[in-house]
Image (cartoon, helix red, strand yellow):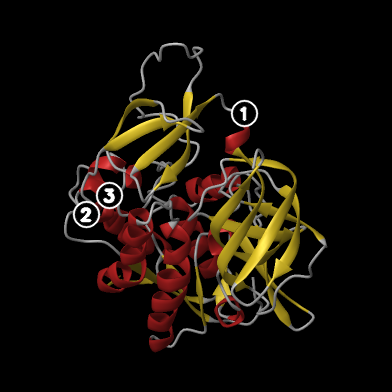
Amino acid sequence: MPEKKLRVVVGLSGGVDSAVAALLLKRAGHEVIGLFMKNWEGDDSDEYCSSRQDLVDAAAVADVIGIEFEAVNFAAEYRERVFADFLREYQAGRTPNPDVLCNSEIKFKAFLDHALTLGADCIATGHYAQVRQFLGEWQLLKGEDGTKDQSYFLHRLNQAQLAKTLFPIGHLYKRDVRQIARDAGLPNHARKDSTGICFIGERPFREFLARYLPRQAGEIRILGTDRSIGRHEGLAYYTIGQREGLGIGGVKGAPEEPWFVAGKDMAHNILYVVQGHEHPALLSTGLVATDLSWIAARPPHTHWVYAAKTRYRQPDAACEIERVSGTECEVIFAAPQWAVTPGQSVVVYESRVCLGGGVIATRQAQNA
């Protein structure tokens, strides 16, 4: 927490993490303004979307803490910068991570720009991450609570964004955050954490995606064969490593093991599956990433040992970066990784420091 007294605009989501972030800044003597961002509208019914309740909770928190509060609508920016890309990626057969793009384009761009018009010195959020200045550069660090660390979703932030950002709860564990909220009498201290993609909420994913991408049924085949064992509803609705929702019953001559999605043939609309969680086709020795974003504005060294995540909550995987250019890099893993998925982000770390990453374009299967 900076010692100099600042004017800080805090993104209040309605959840306990951002509430405690605002509370700690207020207690430290900073001038704090709470800002609620509405990023989705049009079909946000109360059945699946909690945005109305989120706004009520955020306003109640601001009232208890005793800070200014306002709401701003970024729905147009979100639809243009995040949701349009989300649909393009699914239509191309990839599995995007819209939360990564939301952070870089909305929460730390549109929100930051708006905060600066309010005269803010910086912004703050309730993310479990940390930022520091080291040898003249800004670094993004993992949150102290390894089970809640959110640096994966923040890896596209740049020097200018980090220079204007505070993460007041990044040094805390979740249990401590809830205790602080409880002791302070914050009305949302026991509120359940939100899960899933923000604009989908708790609604069935396939049902939501079908509103925008038409169903195109096709064959499900066993990988490496021409044998058809079922029908899929559209390649956009499936992702590498998926087990549930395949609709494959007992297959004559096949052992009684679960089926997993192992590949897609977009040209012929075929979904390929394999049996067994550890099937070689589900394991990757490496990948190629594009759309690179490095926090220090320069790529990591090649042939150094780093750690990488190819999905949130995945344990760090030892790796080397063998080739890096302005547009793409190749990541080679020390041990094969499960269900590396095109469209998802690969994020590279050096110890606790997040270096950045890119979007997975292709994966090198273990059996290739």
In the displayed structure, 350 sits above or below 148; it is: below
Question: Can residue 128 be seen at all in this image of the molecule?
Answer: no
Residue 204 x, y percent position in the rendering: 28, 39
Residue that label 1 marks? 278
The earlier-in-sequence mark between 1 and 3 is 3
- Give the amino acid at mark 2: Tyr
Mark 1 surroundings within 10 Å by alpha-carbon count, few (fewer than 14), some (14 through 19), many (20 or more): few
Q: Residue 307: percent from the left, percent from the top?
A: 73, 54
User: Disc 1 or disc 3, which is closer to the eye?
Assistant: 1
Marks 1 and 3, Cα distance to the nearest angstrom? 38 Å
Real-space CA distance between mark 2 and mark 3, rounded to the nearest whole angstrom = 21 Å
Q: Residue at x 45, y 51 (%)?
A: 16
- Residue 129 in the image: state x and y as whole percent: 61, 60
Q: Is residue 11 visible?
A: yes
Give amino acid for label 1.
Glu
Task: Place residue 155 in its image quadrant.
Answer: bottom right
Q: Residue at x 33, y 25 (%)?
A: 247
Say if 340 sits above or below 31 in the image.
above
Q: Quadrant of the C terminus?
A: top right
Q: Earlier in the sequence, mark 2 or mark 1?
A: 2
Quarter of the figure with residue 244: top left
Relative placement, left or right, of 321 versus 69 is: right
- For discs 2 and 3, the disc positioned in front in the rendered view: 2
Q: Secondary structure at mark 3?
A: loop
Three-letter amino acid code at the position of disc 3: Ser
Q: Which residue is mark 3?
A: 50
Residue under label 2, please give it: 212
Residue 316's spot in the image, x, y percent? Answer: 70, 48
